[in-house]
Amino acid sequence: MKAARRAITETLLKLAREDKTIFALATDSSGSVTLNDFVRELPGQFVECGIAEQDAVGIAAGLAASGLKPFVCGPASFYATRAAEQVKVDVAYSHMNVKVLGVSGGVSYGALGGTHHAVQDVAFMRAVPGLQVLLPADANSAAALTRALVASPEPAYIRVGRGDVEDIYPDDVQVEIGKAITAREGTDAAIIACGEMVYPALKAAELLAKDGLSVRVVDMHTIKPLDIEAVLAAAETGKVVTVEEHSVHGGLGGAAAEVICQAHPVKMRILGLPDETLFSGTNKEVFQHYGLTAEGIAAAVKAL
């Protein structure tokens, strides 16, 4: 097990040793986003912005306009709300090569309550023209997506959690931006998941297999650009459940439903966090409370 945030920053440091155009920025959050090794080894490629996410995004856009490759890092809850206008205007609208790394996304800061929950970020980011949106499922896919992002000139938002997560893929996994991964084949139903919900989705499919149900699991690590072919292939099973650590409004479920309802209507269920002031506790307690567990996902598939 390893935290996706650490996999990203370790990969970034390895690449930045050879590529002096790679910069990292933080908002009094270098420890939180695990950038301390980067800061110690490459201080000339690091900018500390203080607790000022709006400034950080603007500075990153300026660095990108100068031909550099900035990764601006900090809590997802603040980049998706406090710095929303700068992400929209300075990065996406201006088409600057800025990568926004939102750490502790979803309910990673569960016990701190709604001020620190990042459960609307995907809804906002995917509605901004010209901005890619990515949620890797484990450390190895996070590292692979980091390499892809460094090679890409496109503005992007990548969101990860805080704690260690189980390995789903080998360390040499190849991940392509905009191309979903079929993590498990199945014909009776499909679960489309993203981020840390991919692992419990796979466990749910294992539980359902014991009941004789063959369930496909799709890792939709890129919410935008969405892999429409993968969504439609999932719909071919006749039943689709989406699972995300995000509001049920506007995230992965909404993106999949937009495709399915227009091109291949089937029975569908969107699992996520409800439109309410959320239960406070550890992220595991929040998942349990709202049924974002292997057992809860399996029950939703059975209900369809």
Image (spheres, rainbow, N blue to C red):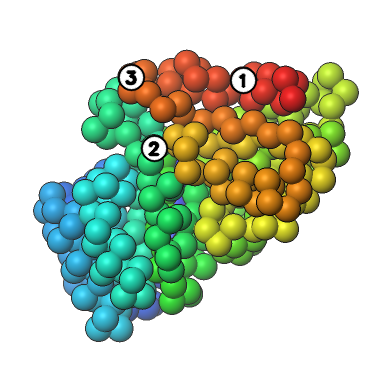
Q: How many marks?
A: 3
Identify the residue shown where x is 55% and y is 62%.
Answer: 225
Provide the secondary structure element on which disc 3 rests.
loop
Q: Which residue is mark 1?
A: 296
Provide the secondary structure element on which disc 1 rests.
helix
The three-letter code of the residue at mark 3 reads Ser
Residue found farthest to the front: 262
User: Residue 120's quadrant in the figure?
Assistant: top left
Identify the residue shown where x is 84% and y is 34%.
Answer: 188
Return the mark for residue 119: 2
Q: Residue 78's x, y, as percent?
A: 25, 46
Provide the secondary structure element on which disc 2 rests.
loop
Q: Which residue is mark 3?
A: 280
The three-letter code of the residue at mark 1 reads Gly
Viewer-nearest residue: 18 or 68 = 68
Image: 226 above or below 69: above
Q: Residue 162's x, y, as percent?
A: 38, 38
Identify the residue shown where x is 41% and y is 27%.
Answer: 275
The three-letter code of the residue at mark 2 reads Val
Image: 204 above or below 56: above
